[in-house]
């Protein structure tokens, strides 16, 4: 359970998908990808997750690094 | 600009970020500056986003994974340098001029949002519960359930049947109550370390790599100087709830996807 607190090195793809596809600012761009289209992804999500499992954590961001270094 | 390409908007910042720091970028990033904000964009091929192709592509999980990962990588790289307002996947414009027009419309709100988000980042908080163990414990340790167990043992078959049904209902309700209570306690504790909290849908089993049951899926906006407090608090919660089969998982820092609603766009949801 020691990996249960922050800065885990793998982040499931699900976390990325949920944010990038369903959150973030929506403006009426010239092409609008509707939420209904995006929801289709969840149909196959289980398959995707089981095949990808986890993805190498995208961020090796300074914030995280700084934090992990300051952590015993 | 031609018909084969579109302008893809990843995020906006208040001050121009250093785009050279974004590595492995297949499409060259550039800035569109208008209305006091900097939009980080790149030209992408229009083909995959044409309505006839898009539906098929969205069902192609490899395509979706590659495109969302690219989007995320770019926003995160910019975030290292600047406070960002991330945009949703596939925010596309035909020309820079069209984007500038949009920025003129939303500029004031974006600037206010950037000001609010400065010095903060989003953290994911998920709590999981081993409901099977919790239920097993309830069955043998919870007073009212134990009483029913005893009554069932002594009752004639017909009565025992009814009592068994009563016991199962009680176990179910008690379990649900406990789970709600734990989730609420986690929320109450972590909320004190953050500025804003947003509750998201609980994900069904099988969509995460964990086998236990998700009981909380939230995003917390945390000031960078409070991150240590936040992480320590999560650690304390894990220690406190280890006996109750509860695990609290945090991830971050994320771009503030969950805290970027422009008032005008809320209705589009």
Image (cartoon, coloured by chain):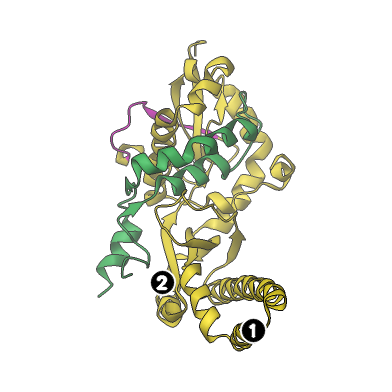
Chain colours: A green, B yellow
Q: Which contiguous range is marked in magenta?
A: B22-33
B3 or B83: nearer the viewer: B3
Q: In the drawing, what numbered circle is on residue B257?
A: none
Left or right of B161? Residue B235 is left
Residue B31 among magenta residues: yes
Instruction: Determine which quarter of the picture holds residue B269.
Output: top right
User: Looking at the image, which residue is at 28% across and 72% down?
Assistant: A71
Labels 2 & 1 near each other (Cβ < 8 A)? no
User: Looking at the image, which residue is at 47% across and 48% down?
Assistant: B207
Q: Chain of mark 2?
A: B
A46 or B220: nearer the viewer: A46
Question: Mark 2 to mark 1: distance in Å?
Answer: 42 Å
Dot 2, how many residues are within 10 Å of its Cα: few (below 14), some (14-19), or many (20+)? many
Dot 2 falls on a residue whose secondary structure is helix
Q: In the drawing, what numbered circle is on residue B231?
A: 2
Image coordinates for residue B152, horizontal then vertical, percent: 63, 82
Residue B13 seen anywhere in this rendered image of the structure? no
Which residue is identified by label 1?
A: B148
Q: Are marks 2 and 1 on the same chain?
A: yes
Vertical relation: A64 (above or below) B3: below
Residue B203 among magenta residues: no
User: Looking at the image, which residue is at 49% across and 35% down?
Assistant: A44
Vertical relation: B86 (above or below) B116: above
Q: Chain of mark 1?
A: B
Dot 1, how many residues are within 10 Å of its Cα: few (below 14), some (14-19), or many (20+)? some
Image coordinates for residue B197, horizontal then vertical, percent: 59, 63
């Amino acid at each position: 359970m020691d990996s249960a607190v922050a800065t885990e090195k793998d982040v499931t793809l699900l976390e990325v998908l949920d944010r990038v596809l369903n959150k973030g600012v929506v403006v009426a761009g010239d092409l609008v990808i509707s939420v209904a289209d995006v929801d289709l992804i969840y149909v196959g999500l289980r398959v995707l997750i089981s095949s990808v499992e986890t993805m190498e954590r995208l961020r090796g961001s300074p914030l995280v690094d700084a934090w992990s270094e300051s952590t015993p | 600009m031609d018909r084969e390409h579109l302008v893809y908007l990843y995020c906006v910042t208040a001050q121009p970020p250093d785009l050279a720091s974004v590595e492995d970028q297949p499409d060259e990033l550039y800035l569109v500056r208008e209305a006091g904000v900097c939009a980080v964009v790149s030209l992408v091929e229009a083909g995959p986003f044409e309505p006839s192709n898009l539906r098929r592509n969205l069902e192609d999980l490899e395509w979706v994974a590659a495109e969302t990962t690219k989007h995320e990588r770019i926003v995160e790289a910019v975030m290292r340098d600047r406070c960002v307002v991330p945009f949703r996947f596939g925010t596309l414009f035909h020309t820079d001029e069209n984007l500038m027009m949009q920025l003129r419309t939303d500029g004031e709100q974006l600037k206010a949002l950037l000001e609010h988000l400065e010095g903060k980042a989003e953290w994911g908080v998920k709590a999981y519960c081993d409901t099977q163990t919790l239920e097993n414990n309830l069955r043998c340790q919870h007073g009212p359930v134990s009483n029913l167990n005893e009554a069932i043992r002594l009752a004639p078959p017909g009565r025992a049947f009814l009592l068994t049904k009563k016991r199962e209902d009680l176990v179910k309700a008690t379990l649900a109550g406990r789970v709600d209570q734990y989730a609420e306690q986690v929320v109450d504790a972590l909320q004190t370390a953050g500025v804003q909290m947003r509750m998201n849908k609980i994900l069904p089993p099988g969509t995460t790599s964990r086998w236990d049951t998700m009981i909380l899926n939230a995003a917390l906006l945390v000031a960078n100087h409070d991150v240590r407090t936040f992480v320590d608090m999560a650690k304390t919660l894990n220690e406190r709830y280890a006996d109750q089969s509860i695990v609290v998982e945090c991830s971050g820092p994320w771009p503030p996807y969950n805290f970027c609603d422009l008032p005008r766009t809320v209705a589009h949801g």
